[in-house]
Image (tube, rainbow, N blue to C red):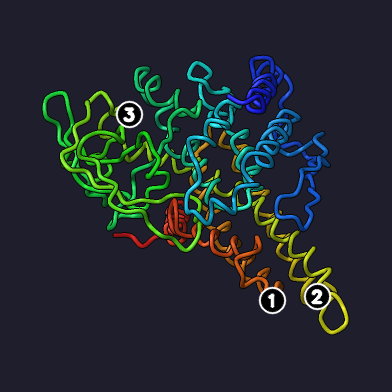
Amino acid sequence: MRAAEQLYARATMALCGRALQKRLASSRNILTPTAVHHKRQISEDPSPKYKTSVQTVGHVLYTQEHFALKDSLRKIIDQEINPYVDKWEDEGQFPAHKIFKILGSAGFLGVNKPVEYGGLGLDFSYNVAVAEELGNINCGGIPMAIGVQSDMATPALARFGSAELKKEFLLPSIMGDKVACLGVSEIGAGSDVASIKTKAVRKGDEFIINGGKMWTTNGAQADWMCLLANTSDGPPHKSKSLICLPMDLPGIQIARKIEKLGMRSSDTVEVFFDDVRVPCKNVIGQEGMGFTYQMLQFQEERLWGVANILTTMENVVQATINYTRQRKIFQQPVLYHQVVHFRLAELQTEIELLRSLLYHCTALYIKGNDVTKLASMAKLKAGRLARELGDSCLQYWGGMGFTSDVLVSRFYRDSRLMSIGAGADEVMLSIICKYMDTLPRK
């Protein structure tokens, strides 16, 4: 490990160890009425140095420890990630093992995971803080890949997995020694998770797996997959199990690497399973409960995605302000035209409203509440706002916005996934309608 990594690890672990947990227990104050939101100064440089200008007293959700965690992560982003983003975007893949090891050594891949398995043992609000800070990475693909590792492939394992499975798969994932991927979506079953066809048939003390998975983030580099498969022929919501599947087993084939509109630095693959044998003990929790476990994972995944894209949207707005202030048309800066600065004010207002919903939802979640409806609302709003914001801001960049050289065009491509992945907008609407009791009765 390089000296820089060791420094990050020592600093972060010192902040987030047992002393931090004791302080949190005695001093945490959620949803105080005197919230003060922080404002970052962002230059035209696509990878600006972080300037701390935060007022932590009375923040609606975060404590000084949250901001210290964000500061530490920002140093890693500026030194180890952003200088290489353009290269990795061009290559279509970033070095997941290298980056995950740096992040894992500093504690960022297991913020709310058990201490005994390498985590920091903090609550989910710290995951949200980390997700927000990862939004300062100058692309969407790398944060998404990190989120798969920390908040999509591992929550069910941490909550329901056996001690043996946690030791074999969770611990090295938190430490950054293994790369994880999530195997849920299939060609005919994306947002409709109950319709997956991949089967795991029990034979003795093993499952024999046949089928395939589609749109698998991290799949080309993954060491193991959190696989959702049918383990019985019962009702679709009670016939599925989550299985820890090593990706080097015979019968697993990476069929192809998928070329995508955006998220180009994140590898996405199609995977086939042909008589893959895995021990039955690799089932996470109770057999047949996989669908339920996955729905619980989706709550954290959706909140994580909202937090992550919020920061990027704010950065895109600020970059657009900077560009339109110096770009002139009709003898005055583009920004000085009322239609431009009014529109940017509207977009910033929408960002703040979404942030309030995120913080409210997170505060309820860490107190043990079911936030499925609110998380679905936040995810729906984030996807639609990202599309609206990307289109509006790109327009103000003119011809420059139609090139691949600026952050706004990359965001325009990457953010389109927010309304598709982890449940499409239409699925979010259906969930919200279910909680409102407005769906047509069968």
- Quick check: marks 3 and 1 in contact, CB under 8 Å? no
In space, the residues marked 3 and 1 are separated at their CA atoms by: 51 Å
Amino acid type of the residue that numbered disc 3 sits on in the rendered structure: Ile
- Residue assigned mark 2: 334
Which residue appears at 33% of the width and 50% of the height? 185
Tell me, for residue 284, which label it has, or none: 3
- Residue type at numbered disc 2: Val
Of tags 3 and 1, the one toward the viewer is 1
Residue density around tag 1, few if under 14, some if 14–19, many if 20 or more, within 10 Å: few
- Residue shown at 36%/62% (left/top)? 440
Q: Position of residue 251 (x, y in %)?
A: 20, 39
Precedes in sequence: disc 2 or disc 3 = 3
Write the residue at 70% across / 64% down.
347
Residue 107 located left or right of residue 339: left
Given residues 270 and 220, the one toward you in this image is 220
Q: Name the front one of labels 2 and 3.
A: 2
Place of residue 127 in the rendered image (x, y in percent of width and height, measured from the top left): 59, 35
Q: Element at badge 2?
A: helix
Is residue 88 positioned above or below 146 on the image?
below
On-image quarter of the N terminus: top right
Quarter containing the C terminus: bottom left
Q: Which residue is mark 1?
A: 398
Dot 2 or dot 1, earlier in sequence: 2
Classify residue 371 as left or right of residue 342: left
Residue 289 visible in image: no
Hey, what amino acid is under mark 1? Answer: Gly
